Image (tube, helix red, strand yellow):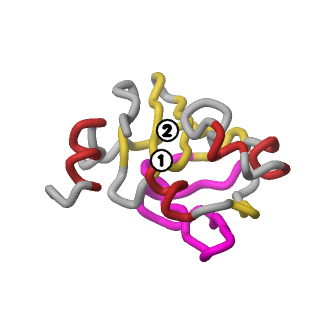
Amino acid sequence: MSYPNGLKYTKEHEWIKIEGSVATIGITKYAIDQLGDIVYLDLPKVGASFKAGVNFGTVESVKTVSDLYMPVSCKITEINQTAIDSPDCLAEDAYSKGWLVKVEVENIPADLLSASEYENYIKGGN
């Protein structure tokens, strides 16, 4: 499995595409595959603010419910209503149609992973 190079990743399996002060956030294909069929998403409301590393929602699959963790300090500017209405779109295209939220970035942590670092991490290479 390959991961897009233009994105950054977290050890909690979120991805982030940073474009200036705006970022798009989703969960990785690896996480989606581990979860199985996704049946429900609980995402924050537009305008909510979060610090990096805190829970910002949940994803529910036929196997389990998992927390989502914010990779950056930010304010929510948009949610993906299509993903809420049809959570299966995450499995179809995790890095394009399957984004979860768009945010106004306040602070970017230094510990975000590159695509190769993330691949190494999920293979157990730390």
Mark 1 vs mark 2: give the one in front.
Answer: 1
Residue linked to disc 1: 28
Quadrant location of the C terminus in the rendered image: bottom left
Q: Is residue 84 magenta?
A: no
| Image location of residue 30, percent across then percent down | 44, 52
Q: Residues within 10 Å of mark 1 (few under 14, many from 20)?
A: many
**Depicted 10 relative to depicted 80: above or below:** below
Q: Residue at x 55, y 64 (%)?
A: 35
Q: From the viewer's perspective, tell me whether residue 61 is left or right of residue 46.
A: left
Q: From the viewer's perspective, tell me whether residue 42 is left or right of residue 22.
A: right
Q: From the viewer's perspective, tell me whether residue 27 is left or right of residue 80.
A: left
**Depicted 57 relative to depicted 96: above or below:** below
Q: Residue furthest bottom?
A: 64
**Residue interval drawn in magenta:** 47-74
Residue linked to disc 2: 105
Kindly indicate whether the residue at mark 2 contacts the one at mark 1 (C-beta within 8 angstroms): no
Q: Which picture quadrant has residue 93?
A: top right
Q: Which picture quadrant has residue 117?
A: top left
| Image location of residue 119, percent across then percent down | 27, 45
First of labels 1, 2 by sequence position? 1
What is the secondary structure assignment of the residue under circle 1? loop
Q: Nearer the viewer, residue 30 or 9?
A: 30
Quadrant location of the N terminus in the rendered image: top left
Q: From the viewer's perspective, tell me whether residue 111 is left or right of residue 68.
A: left
Distance of label 1 from label 2 (alpha carbons): 20 Å
Residue type highlighted by circle 2: Val
